[in-house]
Image (spheres, rainbow, N blue to C red):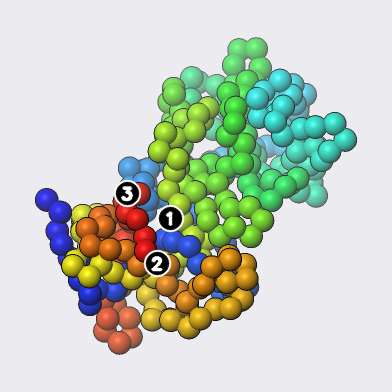
Amino acid sequence: MIRRILSSAATLFILAISVPSHAEWKTPDYARISALLFPETKSWTLVSTMKAADEAYLLTNREKLNEAYSVSGIGKGMESAGACSLMERAFSTHYYFPEGFHVHDVDLDGRMDVIYANPNPCNEGFTTIMWFGTEKGFVIRQGALQNILALRVKEGNPLRMSSVSVGCCGDPIDVYSVGTVDEAPADGGKRVVDYAQLPSRYEIAVPFAAGDTGFVLRTSPLIDNVYDASAKEVLGFPVFGNILSKYPFGCTGEVVGRQVDTDSRLWYFVLLDQACDSL
């Protein structure tokens, strides 16, 4: 049963779009945000904590890793004649070699697999490549999933993972997803602003519906209504402080956190249903 907990007096903030100043922005905690969006993934293995690959092991198997990459869908999509070579840079000490590689049996077949999940050394954003160990060497099963950062994996076959596609070229929207390693999620993922302030207190998700007057959605637990002329130049539409938009009566979603500010105002941290239409 949906609880109607929002009214004209309610204050909310959300993982949503905003245009921060350079002084305020810092790299988001992608793994934490992903676990908030997809609670079932909290117990999955963090890619960042997997065993670091040994340099000698990588150099010994470099030719096999290169061969698997060159014939894979992701390799053909990432490499082009005369352009920056991701593999050359991935194996360069000037970039992420060897610390950018991990080894882990992600498909539970008893053979060690190799994972590269780092900033893309040739373009903006991140990339993840997974080499699955086989009797004959390595194979890459990825196709279109090339501009993502793998965050957590649920070992097995098929392998499942949570990931983020970081907004390119100044786009503040990151898209978080859960799916298999070789196909995009059916729902298209959940959109999150890279400037979002996470709540101080998390809780089990509680459904809600907007009250009679709807509500104003903000990107942080702060009353800021100041017109931002510089943000309008970037986005092409008026921006007022940390206001995202106004949502009308009946908009639904989940409350997943809350926070009380210094003026004793209670803020809800919410995730909105995709069917909500903003004003």
For disc 2, the marked residue is 245
Horizontal relation, residue 259 to residue 187: left or right:
left
Asked which quadrant contains residue 85, the reply is top right
In the image, what residue occupies the spot 51% across and 81% down? 227
**Of the residues under marks 3 and 2, which one precedes in the sequence?**
2
Seen in the picture, residue 132 relative to 20 is either above or below; the reply is above
Q: Residues within 10 Å of mark 3 (few under 14, many from 20)?
A: few
Taking the image as drawn, is residue 56 in sight?
Answer: no
Q: Is residue 198 left or right of residue 113?
A: left
Q: Secondary structure at mark 1?
A: helix
* Residue identifier under label 1: 33
Q: Answer yes or no: do the residues labelled 3 and 2 have beta carbons within 8 Å? A: no
Q: Quick one: label 2, few (<14), some, or many (20+) residues within 10 Å?
A: some
Instruction: Residue lying at the far right in this picture: please name it.
Output: 82
Q: Could you say where residue 155 lies in the image, as x and y percent from the top left?
A: 44, 30
What's the mark number on residue 275? 3
- Which residue is drawn at the image coordinates 64% and 60% (left, top)? 170
The spot of residue 130 in percent (x, y) is 60, 31
* Mark 1 or mark 2, earlier in chain: 1
* Residue 212: image location, x then y, percent: 18, 67
User: Relative to 132, is 116 above or below?
Assistant: below
Residue at 78% over, 42% down? 89
